[in-house]
Image (cartoon, rainbow, N blue to C red):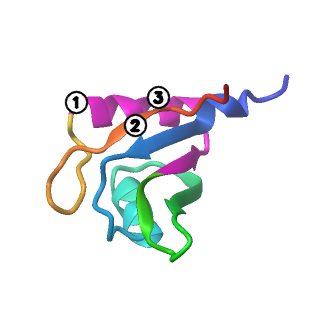
């Protein structure tokens, strides 16, 4: 049976613009999630655009991460909640 990798990809936003991919990955892994990929969208000058994408090891981890963000358990370094939802292509 093929894995449904679409349910492992999460869109995130509303984190500090100076947050690095490494800081974000560390924050996520502190909550015991296994990240297989993480990208912060950047402009032409290389500055964060305030959103990004995370690929989790399993759909269950992606779902649990979203639930923690919704309950404001996972926050950025200024203690602001991070918005997360499944990434869906249109």
Instruction: Say what secondary structure mark 3 lies in.
Output: helix
Specify the label residue 84 is tagged with: 2
Q: CA distance from mark 1 to mark 3?
A: 13 Å
Between 25 and 30, the residue placed more toward the observer is 25
Residue 74 position (above or below residue 26): above
Look at 51% across and 77% down and name the residue there: 45
Residue ranking furthest to the left: 79
Q: Which one is nearer the viewer's eye here, 31 or 8?
A: 8
Quick one: label 3, few (<14), some, or many (20+) residues within 10 Å?
some
From this view, report whether residue 84 is shown above or below residue 18: above
Disc 1 designates what residue? 71
Q: Look at mark 3 in the image and give the residue it sits on.
A: 63
Mainly helix, strand or loop, the magenta region? helix
Quadrant in which the C terminus appears: top right
Does the magenta-highlighted stretch encompass residue 28?
no
Identify the residue at image location x=39%, y=54%: 28
Location of residue 67 in the rendering, given as x and y in whole percent from the top left corner: 34, 28
The residue segment tinted magenta is: 52-71
Alpha carbons under labels 1 and 2: distance apart: 11 Å
The kind of secondary structure element at disc 2 is: strand
Task: Single out the mark in the foreground, 1 or 2.
Answer: 2
Whether label 3 touches label 2, CB < 8 Å: no
**Callout 1: SS:** loop
- Farthest bottom residue in view: 45
The label shown at residue 28 is none
Query: From the viewer's perspective, is 7 left or right of 24?
Result: right
Q: Earlier in the sequence, mark 1 or mark 3?
A: 3
């Amino acid at each position: 049976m093929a894995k449904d990798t679409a349910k492992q990809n999460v869109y995130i936003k509303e984190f500090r613009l100076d947050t690095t991919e490494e800081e974000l990955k560390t924050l996520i892994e502190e909550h015991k999630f296994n990240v297989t990929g993480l990208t912060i969208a950047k402009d032409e000058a290389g500055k964060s655009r305030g959103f990004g994408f995370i690929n989790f090891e399993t759909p269950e981890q992606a779902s649990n991460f979203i639930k923690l963000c919704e309950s404001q358990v996972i926050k950025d370094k200024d203690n602001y909640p991070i918005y997360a939802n499944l990434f869906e292509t249109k």
